[in-house]
Amino acid sequence: MTRRQCYGMLAVLAIAVCLSSVLGAIADEQATEEAIMINNIYWCIHPYCWSTDDGPPKGYDPELWHATFAWELRVHELHMEFVSNMKPDEALIIYPSGACEPISNLLQHAQKTLGRRCIILGTRWLQYPGFLQGDR
């Protein structure tokens, strides 16, 4: 199996997990609370990958890593603004990539701001097979 096929299978798996989580959450909520009309769903997949590292991983160009990290910090500000400005008929699905401070801040802000319209996939971080992790 090629890496491309593995990535494709992981994407399909993530979508399946998401849909089952969403459908289960909707069924539970409909039993106890009034339904919410959602017209737009946004995905936030793997935010803040560079923030999960303590510095440039082995083999990375330090200058490029720091430039990307600075860009990621700006993206974090934009994510927070986006969540704050979402409309009542919009929902957000977040698939976190780790447990660093910016991710925790985004998750807390989205949950507080959106309530039931925020869906976070997975509370345990996935452990990918070694060949997908590379030499880090």
Image (cartoon, rainbow, N blue to C red):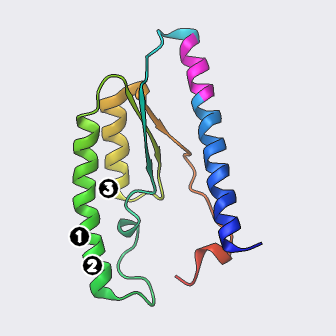
Query: In the rendered structure, does residue 28 fall within the stretch colored magenta?
Result: yes
Mark 3, Cα crowd under 10 Å, few <14 / some 14-19 / many 20+, is some
Indicate which disc residue 70 carries: 1
Residue for badge 3: 102
Q: Position of residue 49 (x, y in %)?
A: 41, 65
**Closer to the camera, 15 or 131?**
15
At numbered mark 3, what does the secondary structure look like: helix, strand or loop?
Answer: helix
**Which element carries disc 1, helix, strand or loop?**
helix
Q: Decide: few, some or many residues near mark 1? Use Cα within 10 Å; few <14, some 14-19, many ≥20.
A: some
Which image quarter holds the N terminus?
Answer: bottom right
Label 2's element? helix
Q: Earlier in the sequence, mark 3 or mark 2?
A: 2
The mark nearer the N terminus, 1 or 3, is 1
Mark 1 vs 3: CB contact within 8 A: no
Q: Of residues 8 and 100, which is closer to you in this image?
A: 8
| Residue to which mark 2 is pinned | 66
70 vs 24: above or below: below
